[in-house]
Image: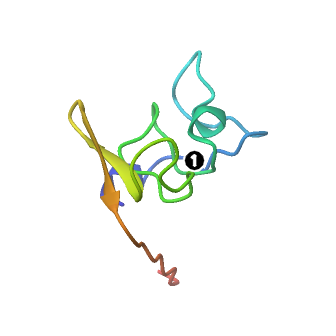
Amino acid sequence: MAYQRTFQFSTRDRDNDNHPSVDCAGNAQGAWWFKSCWKIHLNGPYGSPEPPGVCYHINTIRYCNIPFTEMSIRRV
């Protein structure tokens, strides 16, 4: 999550990402800390139309093979 650390949380009705012409939350079908638009997105649709799993990007390659994720939030 270090990549998303300084970004505002975007939802389909609150476009807070840095992309000037794209609604990242709307396109990704879920809310997240988007820049423009995402490298990993745990709140998106699971495996559809992609193979099963959560999708993420490394450079220009897209992978969709994480079968499970869990987020914990703690006070800092």
> Closest to the observer: 56 or 47?
47
Residue drawn at the location 68% of the way across and 35% of the way down: 15
Q: Which residue is mark 1?
A: 8
Q: Quadrant of the N terminus?
A: bottom left
Count all numbered tags in the image, as a single digit. Answer: 1
Please tell me whether mark 1 sits on a helix, a strand or a loop.
loop
Task: Please state if 33 lies on the left or on the right of 12 as rendered.
Answer: left
Q: Looking at the picture, how far across and down is residue 67, in whole percent?
A: 37, 68
Task: Locate residue 2 relative to residue 36 in the image: left or right.
Answer: left
Left or right? Give the position of 7 relative to 9. left
Q: Residue at x 52, y 83 (%)?
A: 75
Label 1 crowd bin: few (<14), some (14–19), many (20+), radius 10 Å: some
Closest to the observer, 64 or 22: 64
Above/below status of 47 relative to 23: below
Considering only vertical position in the picture, is 10 above or below 65? above
Residue 68: percent from left, percent from top? 41, 73
Residue type at mark 1?
Answer: Gln
Figure coloring: rainbow
Is residue 9 shown above or below 76?
above
Q: Name the residue at 46% across, 37% down.
A: 35
Q: Is residue 4 left or right of residue 20?
A: left
Instruction: Report x, y in % for residue 60.
Output: 23, 30
Expressed as whole percent of the image width and height from the top left, the position of residue 16 reads 63, 37
What's the residue at 44%, 50% (across, down)? 6
